[in-house]
Image (cartoon, grey):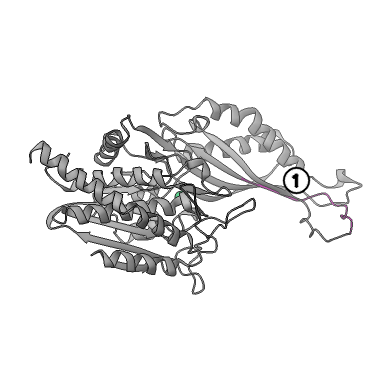
Amino acid sequence: MQDHEHLAELSQLMEAIADRRDDLIALTQDLIRIPTLNPPGDCYRDICEYLDLRLSKHGFSTELIRAHGAPGDSEKYPRWNVIARREGKFSGECVHFNSHIDVVEVGSGWTADPFGGALIDGKIYGRGACDMKGGLAASIIAAEAFIATYPEFHGAIEISGTADEESGGYGGVAYLAEKGFFDPKRVQHVIIPEPLNKDRVCLGHRGGWWAEIETFGEIAHGSMPFLGDCAVRHMSAVISKFEADLFPAMAQRRTEMPVVPEGARQSTMNINSIHGGQPEQDDDYTGLPAHCVPDSCRIVIDRRFLVEENIEDVRGEVTGLLDQMKNDRPKFDYALRELNRVLPSMTDKSAPIAASIAKQIEKVLGKEAEFVASPGSYDQKHIDRIGKLKNCVAYGPGILELAHKPDEYIGVADMMVSVEVMARSLAQLLLPSKE
Ligand SMILES: [Zn+2]
């Protein structure tokens, strides 16, 4: 194809996108108005049926899949997912857009209706507006505009709406990956439109290791603590040990991963919670506490690690310190219960999908794309580890820092930029003569 013909056609694609601006807004609002709160996992069936209807109308064949037996799945809160596929006219590769359909709790501090989807000054407000119903809507509009402009494309386009990303993705992408939906034989490129900003390509994420540590003591009367053994003091010694040895060691470990924000470009650990002794009473309880030496104290730790670290070493570093304390501190004993583990994932920036998105960002915005990695994990882990599909990135509109905040919103202009980037990337990957 001649260059001028190519330009003329791309201008048709840009026109098809411009024509769909109102549709993009309405679609985003509709999605926000379905309150898919997770936990508990509300309205998954409703949003899947909505997407099913929408995509069937545009020539996709669709399937609703319930993650039977996945964590959280029940008759009251079934884990529904939708997957839609549109075949092109000729054989070729498949580009898959995966978005999670769940949103986190509302929290306080809102001035807008969290499920109202109000459009004010070019921004659409609501829980999930940026994380990530705006991204889902952008990918649908990109696909529809592309198909309308190039009905004779090569390969296939898939769009999935999946459950439970906010709680680990086991009833969503993990389940679908186990069923073979992300087998590299049927899907070659995956874009996850998480809100990483319209000019950044996210290559992957750090790993996570979560554990509960319990220290033990012996109950006795609080007036004679020497007759018992205080589990809270043992835990205090654990935390002091972490402060003295573990935190400084982690701060030394820097990564080659381009994690944003900068502070997360190293190993980190959060102590999520601490509890020892008697359970806390309700606010309306007016009695005084009883006098007891606590015989148990528990903390939950959230250790984020780097692609350069090994999960067994991460675990071994913590248990090593605790075992050492057993020798050094009289009567010290502990139990460690692993709660969850997620391995890091990192796509190469020269991978076809990463390179394509970066190139189209540059064409649309006239500046070089930034390659980043995420401090927390998202569904790429399952596509990588279970699906064995490495050609996966996150790219979507929305400001990362607004996710999970009150008055979360998505800018319509940002969404339009992302639609252009996604649609141009489809043109590059699914039209052999384009680049
Ligand atoms: Zn998200």
Q: Quadrant of the N terminus?
A: top left
Q: Residue at x 38, y 45 (%)?
A: 396
* Residue identifier under label 1: 231
Up the image or down, 238 lies above or below 130; here it is: above
Image x and y of residue 287, in percent: 89, 59
The reply to whether residue 390 is in sight is no
In the displayed structure, does residue 5 sit left or right of residue 279? left
The quarter of the picture where residue 240 lies is top right
Q: Which quadrant does the C terminus fall into?
A: top left
Q: Which residues are magenta?
A: 287-300
Disc 1 marks a residue whose amino acid type is: Ala
Q: Is residue 137 visible?
A: yes
Binning the other alpha carbons within 10 Å of mark 1 as few (below 14), some (14 to 19) or many (20 upward) gives many
Is 21 left or right of 115, judged from the image as shown? left
Residue nearer the viewer, 210 or 413: 413
Query: 373 and 359: which one is in front?
Result: 359
Provide residue 96's location: percent of width, then percent of height: 28, 53
Quarter-wise, where is residue 398 in the image?
top left
384 or 434, nearer to the observer = 434
Magenta region includes residue 108: no
Outermost residue toward the left?
Answer: 1
Query: Residue at the spot x=87%, y=55% of the render?
Result: 290
Q: Going by the image, does 319 lie left or right of 56?
A: right
Residue shown at 51%/46% (left/top)? 403
Q: Residue furthest top?
A: 252
Q: Main secondary structure of the magenta part?
A: loop
Residue drawn at the location 41% of the way across and 47% of the way down: 412
Of helix, strand and loop, which one carries label 1? helix
Where is residue 369? Give x, y as percent: 34, 32
**Membership of 290 in magenta stretch:** yes
In x, y percent, where is residue 333?
68, 44
